[in-house]
Image (cartoon, rainbow, N blue to C red):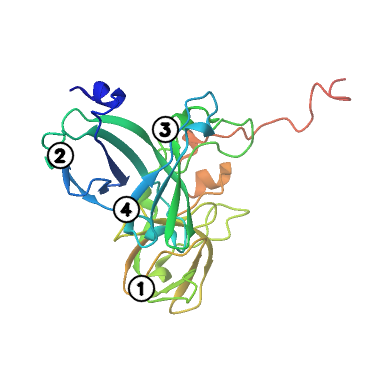
Amino acid sequence: MAFLDQETSVDEGFPTELYKFVRGSTVTPFTSNDQEVVFGGDTFVPTLIKRTQPSQTGERLAANITVTVARDNPIVSDYRIVVPSSSLFLTVFRYHRSIATPLLPTPVDVAVFWQGRIRAVKFTRSEAEMTCEPLSGFLKRDGLRAQYQSLCNHMLYGPDCTVDRTLFDLAFTADSVSLDGLTITSTGLTATPPPVGGIGEASFYSGGGFVRRELIPEDRRLITDFNETGARDTITILNAFEDLNAGEALTAFAGCIRTRQSCNSKFDNIENFGGFPYIPIRNPFGAGGTR
């Protein structure tokens, strides 16, 4: 029988679901089946997992689902201390096992039931509840808009900025990490270039500088402070890396305070500056604007 026939059948349905979690290049496949299922080149491992039913209404939040797993499931371990810097995406596949051969490990006629990403994780006793938002939710949100302002509108190192991040990075090894994980000390940080760019440039990392963990390249943290302490300098990050240890390789990238002066003197990129530095101070449409 075809999928739709079994889905709407009174007594011929034998539903099974596959849950494919993806973060960056890491794929974690689970299934509600009682045995492993091979599909799309992935082996879906049986686990305790359940979900709520999405509602088919015009409301955006109605399409959200809640996926519940055991508290010790590895898929939620990254959410125990801090929220990961990269999104975790989920695709739910659904198919019906054959009543004649229910143990067949390779499914046929598989349908995509739901796609989206995990927005939040709530731990309750022995379970972890993942609140999941559908992909359609992205389309109903306001995107980034260019503002009529003196500061640059471009994303640093983005396609409109065009600055090559590899020219403004610093590879180093963590010598020590504070107990709260927010302060990283390293002799390699002493090679940090001095502040360039004028007013507001407190350090090379001011204005959105970040540090990347080389073991997990998609794991990044915003640099909030930089201190020169002599033989070993320190950086302070906004959120701690999970289980960061001394000896790990890291790479720090410069920030940008988005002024025209900083764009020119620090990055030599004035031709791509995305701000409007010559906005009139006096409003020509206001009182006293014209004479």
User: Residue 142: x percent and y percent?
Assistant: 55, 30
Q: Secondary structure at mark 3?
A: loop
The answer to whether residue 205 is left or right of residue 117 is: right
Name which of mark 4 and mark 2 comes first in the sequence. Answer: 4
What residue did someone put label 4 on?
48
Contact flag, marks 3 and 2 (Cβ < 8 Å): no
Q: Secondary structure at mark 4?
A: loop
What residue did someone put label 2 on?
102
Quarter of the image where the N terminus is located: top left
4 vs 2, front mark: 2
The answer to whether residue 21 is left or right of residue 121 is: left
Contact flag, marks 4 and 1 (Cβ < 8 Å): no
Name which of mark 3 and mark 2 comes first in the sequence. Answer: 2
CA distance separating discs 4 and 2: 19 Å
Residue shown at the point (41%, 69%) measured from the top left: 189
Instruction: Say which amino acid is labelled 4.
Output: Leu
Contact flag, marks 4 and 2 (Cβ < 8 Å): no
Name which of mark 4 and mark 1 comes first in the sequence. Answer: 4
Residue shown at the point (32%, 54%) measured from the top left: 217
1 vs 3, front mark: 3
Q: Residue farthest to the bottom?
A: 231
> From the viewer's perspective, is residue 218 above or below residue 179?
above
What residue did someone put label 1 on?
245
Name which of mark 3 and mark 4 comes first in the sequence. Answer: 4
CA distance separating discs 1 and 3: 36 Å
What residue did someone put label 3 on?
135
Contact flag, marks 1 and 3 (Cβ < 8 Å): no
4 vs 1, front mark: 4
Circle 1 packing at 10 Å, graded few (<14), some (14-19), many (20+), is some
